[in-house]
Image: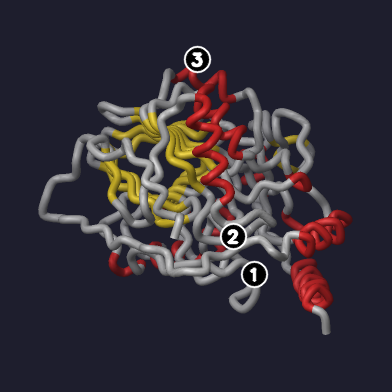
Amino acid sequence: MKRWIRIVLLLIIVVIFWAFVRGDMHTEGDILRFMKSERYIGDKFVNSVETSSGSFKDIFKIIKDYRSSSDVEKVPLKDIQVNRPVFDESEPKSDSYKIVWFGHSGFILEMSGVRLLVDAVFSERASMLSFVGPKRFHEPPLLLEELPHIDAVVLSHDHYDHLDRKVVNYFADKDVKFIMPLGVGSHLKKWGVSADKITELDYHDSINIGDLELIAGPARHFSGRGLLDRNKTLWCSFMFFGTNQQIFYSGDTGYTETYKMLKDRYGSFDVCLIQIGAYNKNWEDIHLYPSDAVKMSEMLGSEYTIPLHWGTFNLAMHSWTEPVEEFVKHGNKAGIKISTPEIGAVTDSSNINNTDYWWRL
């Protein structure tokens, strides 16, 4: 049987299974809470600008595009170098920032004495099924049980490549806060996380952990973990305000000039972590092209930009290195400062000025 026919049949099986997976339902109290949000219209969350997130009818066009890109190097042909970060718990946490990229969009952010785990995925696949779906290129820099003390787990939205049930299950019984957009807490409560550990935020809502302030920002995306729960939860970016620095994380987003408003409202950012990968003409409203990520860096007044959402999972038709190569090319042309740390490397203000092309294996 031809490979593309196997792919089609497998997708059909997955979609049929997916159709019977009900999204986590909200309580009446949840719905009343959501109705206070400008982003909640009817019975779902919406973007501030008209946005297409694709539909089932696009599946065959996507398969055709996937077949035509069969000669593209979608996964690394050599092993990726993964660093093992060291956290000395006997030393006081730095008042400055430390960032450890775990691959894709996951990272640890240490800032103003607070340590956050953001959108990290430790599962083998970014999928609802353990045996099919995007498989990771490399092991995580650390196992879950090897992580240092985490003060809060931060989630930008509920897609499988950002919200990993394995991570939630590990921290469910620990002294850890969970911070996320409106509605995402329904998933966590179903998985056994106590409601008093969960904080849900609308755009521009904030929460303080020690000397660190987190503010949920806008994003242009969508949500859902099954066919029946699309856009039942919100998606967002995050801004982190410490005693000395301001850091921005895009989550997943398509291009929108809304981000100009963030600079006007909150000021410029010392570091912006921005999504660059998994773009395609079939879903261009909901993911940034690398050139758009450069424009976004400029809009936000970013001193340094770290590109995320690449290097771990194959979620599109382009090669696994195309996003970062394109981002560096457009970024250099625009004159923005770029940092491309290795997976697992500790990045701080002393070494952030680093683009060493480590992905050219």
Q: Residue furthest left?
A: 90
Quadrant where the C terminus sits is: bottom left
Mark 2 is on which residue type?
Answer: Tyr
Left or right side of 39 for 2: right
Residue shown at 82%/72% (left/top)? 8
Q: In this rendering, which labeled residue sits more in front, label 3 or label 1?
A: 1
Circle 1 Cα neighbour tier, 10 Å, few/some/many (<14 / 14–19 / ≥20)? some
Circle 2 Cα neighbour tier, 10 Å, few/some/many (<14 / 14–19 / ≥20)? some
Q: Position of residue 344 (x, y in %)?
A: 34, 57
Q: Position of residue 207 (x, y in %)?
A: 40, 35
Above or below 344: residue 144: below
Name the residue tied to disc 1: 133
Circle 3 Cα neighbour tier, 10 Å, few/some/many (<14 / 14–19 / ≥20)? few
Q: Nearer the N terminus, badge 3 or badge 1?
A: 1
Name the residue tied to disc 3: 264
Q: Position of residue 288 (x, y in %)?
A: 63, 39
Contact between marks 2 and 1 (CB within 8 A): the answer is: yes
Mark 3 is on which residue type?
Answer: Asp
Residue shown at 51%/23% (left/top)? 298
Q: Position of residue 156 (x, y in %)?
A: 53, 45
Q: Nearer the N terminus, badge 2 or badge 1?
A: 1
- For the question of whether residue 12 can be seen, the reply is yes
Q: CA distance from mark 2 to mark 1?
A: 10 Å
Task: Please give the label number shown on residue 160.
Answer: 2
